[in-house]
Image: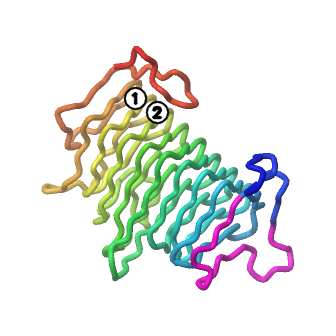
Amino acid sequence: FIDSKDGGDIDRTIVKAGDKAIKQWFDLGRRAKGSKVVGLTILGNRTHSLAICNAYSEVSHCKFVGGTDQLSFEGGGGLVSHCQFEGAGDDAVDADNSVSWTVEHCTIKGAHDDGIEVRLHAKKGPITTHIARYNTFTECTTGVQFIDYAGDSRRRFEIHGNVFKNTKSTALDCTVHTSNRNTDGSPMVEEATIFGNTIDGCLNGITMAPRLVILNNIITNTKEKGIVKGKHLEAGARSIVDHCLFFGNALDYDEGVDLGKSIFTFDPQYVDATSYALSPGSQ
């Protein structure tokens, strides 16, 4: 694929861990910083399909099929771009134990658990940045899930320009590790900026935490709620929802969510339910 730029070469170049391998995954080790994996179909294994264990590696134009966790940041970070993730038995991207990373221009379909999962275990050191942008999450149980633990994980998040479609639970879920997916939200201390996303046809849109900035999103056709307040937004919380459009939801947002002055409730007029581009007549 590197030479041909033919997507068919991705389908024809297949790797899978051997059945007798002690560890059932491919591992970019700590001394492999700067390595690149490009243009492969990686068939799933019993644990991780591909693990990044160094501070920065790149994975691009790959297809991940089946298995349990498909790509994991095991103490590592880097760039994942233009990849397809299909049918993860657990998470498409497991970013629990990670340093700075970006996941962009990927399609994540049918993850049994999360499209991207991040467990917020407390750690020391500099703040790391974690970005998910321009991806499509479809038919996953949850799109992006932040699982909170006591303390500060020293992370900040940017979630923007993504499409979340038909998640069985919440498109973007803040939850506590002892109460996964109960829509109570979480008290996470990490900051997350969530902007420019389209959320359509999900069970719920976003569950709240105290330090979320939610701007310029379109949330449509959720079966329960567009924005779920949860139980952790105490007085003085800095979360805000503004410049967002709601349409066709069973309930747009819970009472008590801190709303700005630019909240809209009209039909966005999608051109189609694939690209979610807006028609010329859209406001």
Residue 126 occupies quadrant: bottom left
**Does 42 appear in magenta?**
no
The circle on residue 86 is none
Seen from the viewer's position, the closer of residues 81 and 276 is: 81
Pinpoint residue 280: horizontal percent, then vertical percent: 43, 17
243 up-or-down from 66: above or below:
above
| Three-letter code, disc 1 | Ala
Q: Residue at x 35, y 29 (%)?
A: 246
Q: Earlier in the sequence, mark 1 or mark 2?
A: 2
- The segment highlighted magenta reads 16-38
Apparent side of residue 123 relative to residue 35 in the rendered image (left or right): left
The circle on residue 250 is 1
Quadrant housing the N terminus: bottom right
The circle on residue 223 is 2
Badge 1 vs badge 2, beta-carbon distance below 8 Å = yes
Q: Residue at x 58, y 61 (%)?
A: 93
Apparent side of residue 82 relative to residue 193 in the rendered image (left or right): right
Seen from the viewer's position, the closer of residues 162 and 67 is: 162
Q: Residue at x 67, y 69 (%)?
A: 50
Pinpoint residue 152: horizontal percent, then vertical percent: 31, 74
